[in-house]
Image (spheres, helix red, strand yellow):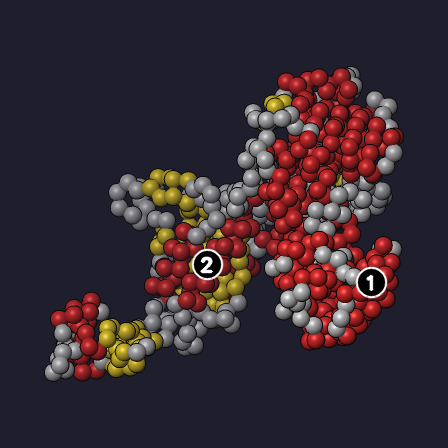
Amino acid sequence: MSTTATKNLLVELFVEELPPKALKKLGDAFAGVLREQLAAQGLADAGSVLTAFASPRRLAAHLTAVSPQATDRAVSQKLMPVAVGLDSAGNATPALLKRLTALGADASAVPGLKRAADGKAEALFYESTVTGATLAEGLQKALAEAIAKLPIPKVMSYQLEANCELPGWSSVSFVRPAHGLVALHGHEVVAIEALGLKSGRDTHGHRFEAKVDPVVLRDADSYAQQLAEDGAVIASFSARRAEIARQLAAAAAKVGGGAKPIEDDALLDEVTALVERPNVLTCAFESEFLAVPQECLILTMKANQKYFPLMDAEGKLTNRFLVVSNITPDDASAVIQGNERVVRPRLADAKFFFDQDRKKSLASRVESLGKVVYHNKLGTQGERVTRVMHIARAIAEKMGDAKLAAQATQAAQLAKADLVTDMVGEFPELQGTMGRYYALHDGLDAAVADAIEDHYKPRFAGDTLPRGEVGVAVALADKLETLVGMFGIGNLPTGDRDPFALRRHGLGVVRMLIEKKLPLQFHELTRLAFDAFPAGVLQDAAVALDEFLIERLKGYLKEGGFAPAEVDAAIYAQKLGLWSTIPQRLAAVRAFAALPEAPALAAANKRIGNILKKAPEAADAHVSEVLLQEPAEKALFAAMQQVVPAADGRFDAGDYTGSLQSLAALRAPVDAFFDGVMVNAEQLDLRLNRLGLLRSLHESMNRVAQLERLAT
């Protein structure tokens, strides 16, 4: 990049209101591609500082140290082998002349061609100087790329005005109609065009509160300041977000009593994308609505109105809420009253739904689930409930006593009943949550009510797990039923597509088994779930499901900081067994790997495994002390007699680390065995005895983990 007269660059597209949920992504993408393209053309470099701007009606980028023209650069282009380009007399062949013509050169360039080795042959190279792009040329290309690469799933096609810069009637496609284009290099306008617009220095501020219109920008660096002072707009998304957060906290502090606005980053981002000049106002609603579960009120205020409910010091909803307005009137009472008037009917609807739903018990609604289709190949929600009940009961019986099994069965029966309530029909996000409230209203045990809410957990990455054993049993049953059903009818996740959230369900199963330390055999769980389905409904997908869940397990453990080799070693011993022991096995593997004896023992374990694979007769081989002949095999047998019982004792006590560390004492006798003993002896009884010795050693070494996975 030429450093001559570098200046800061500003580019802005002024448009109609952009989609709020996509605004930040659009702003970052627009600015990022502009910088990337300018740098690729040599007009900016790594030292250029990028600032992205995004407001409801603009996308802009400010980039420092941008050159008015890129430096010229030398280009060397391979043409063809010398034998093809020149004849025996050294004259250019027709093929060479044709290639030069395509590059804008002629026969006069032949004497200047360079010869250089290219693999085994000598080739001709054409060297030329490419003139650096001017900023106008480079920015025109960069802007076109930035527009084309915006992450927009759908665009609008709109007719250009009759007096636009493009002749005749034309239409363009963009996320929203564009009405202005600014391109300033320092204080100078860069002449470019886009979307039927020519660049200039005029932009526009707030739709209602700008002091002047248009806002005539002095230079690239005055953009944010002039928009703030003359246009009543905070152009920076991050600055506007921070200002909203500051005003929310200040408004809550004025209310007092430890009140705080609800924390919701997604809502804050969306509101930031809806306003250009935020003004936070405090509103209220009638206290009688607080009799409705706060989740209902919070959801309707957030989802429908984009309000910030105020919570008290204990985290309970108050009858106050905060509105982020886009205008700052001298008297805000009309705005406050208008928002209070708008929210009142929505809260009244929520109260009506809640009151109506409580007139029927959850148990009375279960029958209605038989009319709700779950999947055309898997039946109704009612049939699904029957399957989940079967699985939940079996899981609970393995986890605890008859009381736990009865509670899990009841919770599984009622878990989906709130799907046919008015409240969940209006707010699907409240499924499970409303079931808990209605269960408590019906006088059910708190453990059952909690399980109804918790059986959807974990709903997302990082979510909490069910709080009690009943909830864990039902949540496991629900997720396993979903996984088995979908795998059994061939609905597997592919690539980025996972419409039934099977990966999330799989990770939920993994997390509950491990983090809740459940004494449940993985293989038994999946078979329980398959057995809950009628014969002939599902394909045989047991192996595919096992592999899918094992991959989720590996991913979970690797995210915990364990190396792939450690994970593979620890999983092997309990691939289809007690996953709850795997974290302790991993810790043991890591401690073992740090021992000086570890590499040799891991390599020996791998060698033993290979020997046993090639000797099927070893499966039934046993060691007899009287058949031991060589000193090295006698020494190994004696060492195993001392070490293995100690290692097994520690293993049985759950001390996996101590068990593996005990085995480290076998390194020397194992090394000596392979140095001094011929395993494949000609005498059958000696060979089988030695294979039996190795099989016994292999089993002992692999009780905690498959140590050969650690061999490099």
Task: Determine which quarter of the picture holds residue 537.
Answer: top right
Q: Amino acid at mark 2?
A: Val
In the picture as drawn, the residue positioned furthest to the front comes out as 683
- Report crowding for label 1: few under 14, some 14 to 19, many 20 or more residues within 10 A (C-alpha): many
The secondary structure type at the circle numbered 2 is helix
Instruction: Point out the tag, 1 or 2, that comes first from the N-terminus.
Output: 2
**Where is residue 598 drawn, in percent x and y?**
73, 70
| Mark pair 1, 2: CA separation | 63 Å
Front residue (pair 236, 254): 236
558 displayed left or right of 124: right
Left or right placement of residue 668 versus residue 383 in this view: right
Give the percent coordinates (x, y) of residue 703. 76, 57
Residue 587, percent from left and from top: 77, 61
Residue at figure coordinates x 80%, y 65% from the top left: 626
Q: Quarter-wise, where is residue 385 in the image?
A: top right
SS for callout 1: helix
Q: Which residue is mark 2?
A: 33
Q: Residue at x 49, y 65 (%)?
A: 63
Quarter of the C terminus within the rendering = bottom right
Q: Measuring 46% from the left and 58% from the top, which residue is drawn there?
A: 33
Place residue 188 in its image quadrant: bottom left
Please state which amino acid type lies under the numbered disc 1: Val
Location of residue 304 with respect to 1 vertically, above or below = above
Circle 1 is placed at which residue position? 644
Nearest the eye: 543 or 147? 543
Considering depth in this image, is 532 or 124 the residue closer to the camera? 532
Is residue 526 shown to the viewer in this render? Answer: yes
The image shows residue 230, relative to residue 605, as above or below, that is: above
